Amino acid sequence: MNYFSTIIFLLRDRQDFLEEIHQGVRLKSKISSLMISSFCFFALYGAIIGSFDGWAQALSSAIKLPALYLITLVVCLPTLYIFNVLFGSKQNIAQHFTYLLSAVSVIAILLCGFAPVTLFFLITINNSFKDYYFFMLLNVSIFALTGIIGVSFLYQIMRPIADPNDESVQAEKATALPAKAPDLTDFKPDFQVEASGKPEKSEFKNNLQVRTNILRFWLVLYGFVGSQLGWVLRPFFGSPGDGFALFRAKGGNIITGVWTAFTNLLN
Amino acid sequence: MKPDLEDLKITERELENLSGFEAGPIFIGGIFGGVYRSSVFRNPQRFLWFCLTEVLVFALIFTFTVPIGLSTLPGNVNNSIKDVSTTLQFLQTTVGIALLVLLLWNIYMGWRGKRFKGLMHLLDEIDRYHQVLAAIDLLDQLEAVDSQVNLANRQDALAALSLTRNSLVSALMTEKILRESRGLLARRHDLVTNIENNLSALQTIEINNRANEYGQLLNAALQIGMSVHAEIQQVSSRL
């Protein structure tokens, strides 16, 4: 009933939470709760940044920001799932979706953590072009920071790890895991060696390596799709003196947009 | 809660294993792909949560319709979309699709919910059973603070609740077997017999303890047991 308790469970008992996803325990309720709670957090932050340019923009951004993150996730999910299954993952699409939603929820809660800072600057700056570019770059930095943390969280939880009961891969596991992820070292694997037809060690290692590379590639893809969708859905902040616009012209991309904002701030 | 009372609880994971579905206070099988419980319309608090969930789900669906709405708009290649008529056109498409999906989702849940009537009834009984456990826990707490409150026959109450728990577990298993296998398995008979035996034992305990402090709680346990028995008989006779 309380959808936000799932995100608290994720933050407090991360290992148990991930263990439950691995075992497929209460996946549907996890997906529902994470979707709804991350939607609420994104909508709240979207409303705050949108209120820079009035209530209409606030309302628009409260829908656009959750759309940006959640649609990007749904668009990129099949790629990750199909490639992972192709290279030996035993996890189903619901488990993949829950892992990705967990990372997105972490981004959402981090953004909410920044909400008071954004709100403070929103109140203390003027609705002028100079402040607009400052506010925009401030938020781009916040989105970049939360995105990096979210992506590294996803990389940690989804990186394929070998079976802990299989002695042949223990050594590799010990060297492969970073020193600063002790809480995830006991996390159960998604690769299980079949009793009949045990694969060769080299093939096993190759598959692990390939899946780690797939994850890295997918994270880049996620960033690309997200930035393009963000560009298509803009404005999120509005523009002073320009009036409310539902969507901007389709031309350009996010890199040119950030560069323009940066040069305008310096001039 | 004391450990002996804690052991009597039917945990969410146990419930999921027994029924084959994630059972929450509002939905069976989660929001997406599951069904809502009929009890949401009898409990005002749950009904409020259900309405709130409907609003949130609508907002979530609306979020996903944004690209569809955007794709139907006349080209904004060079200009921003600012005029009211285009905005209204966008809202017509997105809100329309979102409302349609929401309606279809509710119709689907209502239609699918008919299959789960037995399970819903059993879940309501499990809620009542947990309420009885909470009441005993309250009595335990009172006893701990005030030494003058000395409640007799606690063990009988726990024994009765243990029987009720077994009946509920058996009933959940029976319902699952009947739902999945349409009553073809021989195990059904054993499980129904088990429920009947538990019910007889419950009636005996209840008669012996009718006059003491736990009488009401024992009566509640008996009512749950009888209700479970009746539900299983009904489900069995339907097949």
Image (cartoon, coloured by chain):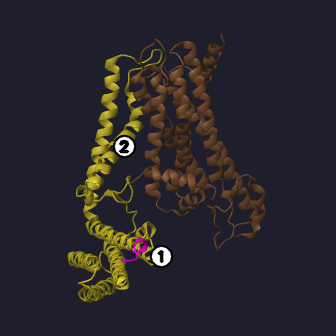
Chain colours: A brown, B yellow
Residue A255 drawn at (x, y percent): 62, 24
Residue range in magenta is: B143-148
* Circles 2 and 1 in contact, beta carbons < 8 Å: no
**CA separation in Å, label 2 and label 1:** 38 Å
Mark 2 or 1: in front is 1
- Which residue in the protein does label 1 denote? B3
* Front-most of residues B109 and B183: B109
Residue at x 27%, y 56% (from the top left corner): B40
Nearest to N terminus: mark 2 or mark 1: 1
Residue A265, position as x, y percentages in the image: 63, 15
Crowding at mark 2 (Cα within 10 Å: few <14, some 14-19, many 20+) = some
Which amino acid type is marked by label 1? Answer: Pro
Residue that mark 2 sits on: B56
Label placed on residue A41: none
Q: Amino acid at mark 2?
A: Leu
Residue B68 among magenta residues: no
Q: Secondary structure at mark 2?
A: helix
Residue under the image location 45 percent in, 41 percent down: A39
User: Which quarter shows the N terminus of chain A?
Assistant: bottom left
